């Protein structure tokens, strides 16, 4: 059936969704959810192994902890399918609220979960279940936040608005690591392992309440509201995405690989390696990471501004090329024995992560039409995590025992090359109309 209704433009924004409110809601939700995710990542590098997998050597404990870390990345594509379905069928706002609740409840429950010494094998089993819940929640979070920002953006500023959910990871990581750093300075090792590590998980409940308050005050995005009015929704968004839009979904996922590899190798793996092999204390390495992540936060608005001005592809191709070269710097910088060299490596990797990550807030939504945009963008974002992040710390731990840090740096370079080739295969999306149906 053909409709004569005038297509909406990106300026048809409900009065309730002011630019400041959209920016705040898209930013605060991803900041809270990534805080939850990074709290677990930091705990996995420091304490999850001894508490939940006490049997075996320290290496076996670390590998087990990294396996639980990867479980959430396997759950994230399922979360993107589940929340994407409802996001494309019911709306962006309600789906974002549900994903935030699931993530927050899972994280808080990890904070009260007894260890192996108390309940035996039930401890790691329940940990894996809650970690799966974290992955489901985060799988639906990013796509909705990116759509909230980009579908409310004025013309020519989609990457700038799409930057706000991309800033969430920097702030979430800084909050998580800063809290762990404070605990490491205030508590001794026995106190930290006994109960101190649980505090960041429990604080998630407070943060989620704040996030819910902000998001419940939003109105539905204008692009989706107009699509509903024109009855353009599809019954099974996932089926349509897989059958009609599989190519942009696959290329978008591969373009994301570099972001994940840069981040999780330079944080989770490097933190574990720095404490166990390079002889740094928890607090000193966490301090270096807190400093380095500031460069990720600085790179995010710079890259967003550049991608609005010059296009998504040129910025991403430059970032991927530099990331390929950065892999070769890992071994010489981390093994030099200098804290300055280690901090330089972390700062460079996280700067490049922010530089390649920022344009994705606009690029991935621009790859899909309105009726499958939540599903498609979320699927691309989270499928990239399986390749670039789910097993990255685990494989890096294996690679370093086989060939040293040079092999781990090679992993980063290969991941960046994969993304560079994917971006080359994509068309420029800067001028696409988000109100289009096909």
Image (spheres, rainbow, N blue to C red):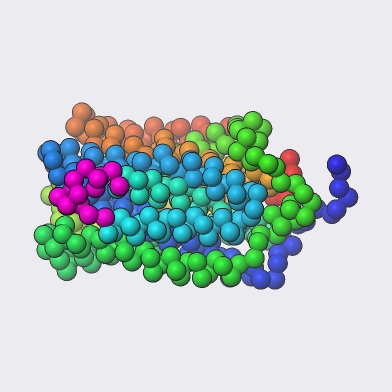
385, 281: nearer the viewer: 385
Q: Is residue 105 above or below residue 56?
A: below
Above or below, 43 against 428 in this view is: below
Tell me the quarter of the image containing the N terminus.
top right
Closer to the camera, 315 or 9? Answer: 9
199 inside magenta stretch: no
Left or right: 258 as drawn, with respect to 38: right
Residue at 59 percent of width and 70 percent of height: 217
Q: Which residues are magenta?
A: 113-126
Give the number of marks. Answer: 0
Q: Is residue 355 left or right of residue 284?
A: right
Q: Is 57 displayed left or right of 215 in the figure?
A: left
Residue at the spot 30% in from the left edge and 55% down from the top edge: 110
**Residue 129 location (% of width, % of height):** 35, 45
Q: Is residue 288 above or below residue 372?
A: below
- Relative image position of residue 20 (x, y in whole percent): 58, 70
Q: On the image, which quarter does residue 25 sit in?
A: bottom right
Q: Quadrant of the C terminus?
A: top right
Which quadrant holds residue 206?
bottom left
Query: Extreme top residue here?
Result: 402
Secondary structure mostly taken by the magenta-highlighted segment of the chain: helix
Residue that extends furthest to the right in the rendered view of this protein:
4
Residue at point 42%, 61% (across, down): 32
At a point 41% along the width and 59% down the height, the residue shown is 104
């Amino acid at each position: 059936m053909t409709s004569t209704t005038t297509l909406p433009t990106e300026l048809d924004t409900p009065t309730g969704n002011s630019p400041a409110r959209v920016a705040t809601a898209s930013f605060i939700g991803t900041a809270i959810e990534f805080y939850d995710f990074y709290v677990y990542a930091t705990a996995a590098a420091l304490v999850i192994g001894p508490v939940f997998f006490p049997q075996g050597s320290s290496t076996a404990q670390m590998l087990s902890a990294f396996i639980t870390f990867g479980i959430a990345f396997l759950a994230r594509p399922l979360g993107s399918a589940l929340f994407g379905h409802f996001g494309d069928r019911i709306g962006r706002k309600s789906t974002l609220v549900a994903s935030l609740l699931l993530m927050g409840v899972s994280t808080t429950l990890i904070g009260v979960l007894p260890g192996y010494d108390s309940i035996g094998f039930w401890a790691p089993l329940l940990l894996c279940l809650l970690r799966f819940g974290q992955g489901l929640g985060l799988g639906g979070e990013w796509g909705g936040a990116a759509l909230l920002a980009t579908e409310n953006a004025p013309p020519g500023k989609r990457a700038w608005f799409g930057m706000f959910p991309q800033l969430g990871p920097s702030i979430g990581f800084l909050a998580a690591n800063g809290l762990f750093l404070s605990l490491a300075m205030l508590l001794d090792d026995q106190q930290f392992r006994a109960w101190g590590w649980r505090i960041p998980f429990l604080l998630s409940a407070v943060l989620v309440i704040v996030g819910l308050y902000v998001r419940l005050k939003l109105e539905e995005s204008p692009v989706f509201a107009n699509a509903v009015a024109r009855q353009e929704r599809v019954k099974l968004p996932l089926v349509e995405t897989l059958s009609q839009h599989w190519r942009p979904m696959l290329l978008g996922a591969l373009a994301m690989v570099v972001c994940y590899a840069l981040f999780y190798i330079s944080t989770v793996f490097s933190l574990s390696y720095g404490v166990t092999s390079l002889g740094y204390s928890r607090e000193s390495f966490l301090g270096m990471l807190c400093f380095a992540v500031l460069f990720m936060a600085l790179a995010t608005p710079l890259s967003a501004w550049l991608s609005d001005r010059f296009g998504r592809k040129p910025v991403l191709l430059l970032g991927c090329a530099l990331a390929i070269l950065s892999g070769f710097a890992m071994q010489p910088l981390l093994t030099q024995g200098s804290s300055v060299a280690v901090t330089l490596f972390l700062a460079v990797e996280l700067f490049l992560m922010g530089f390649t990550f920022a344009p994705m807030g606009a690029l991935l939504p621009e790859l899909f039409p309105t009726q499958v945009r939540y599903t498609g963008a979320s699927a691309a974002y989270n499928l990239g995590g399986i390749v670039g992040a789910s097993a990255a710390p685990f494989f890096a731990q294996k690679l370093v025992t086989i060939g040293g840090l040079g092999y781990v740096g090679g992993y980063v370079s290969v991941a960046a090359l994969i993304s560079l080739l994917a971006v080359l295969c994509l068309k420029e999306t800067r001028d696409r109309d988000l109100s289009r149906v096909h």
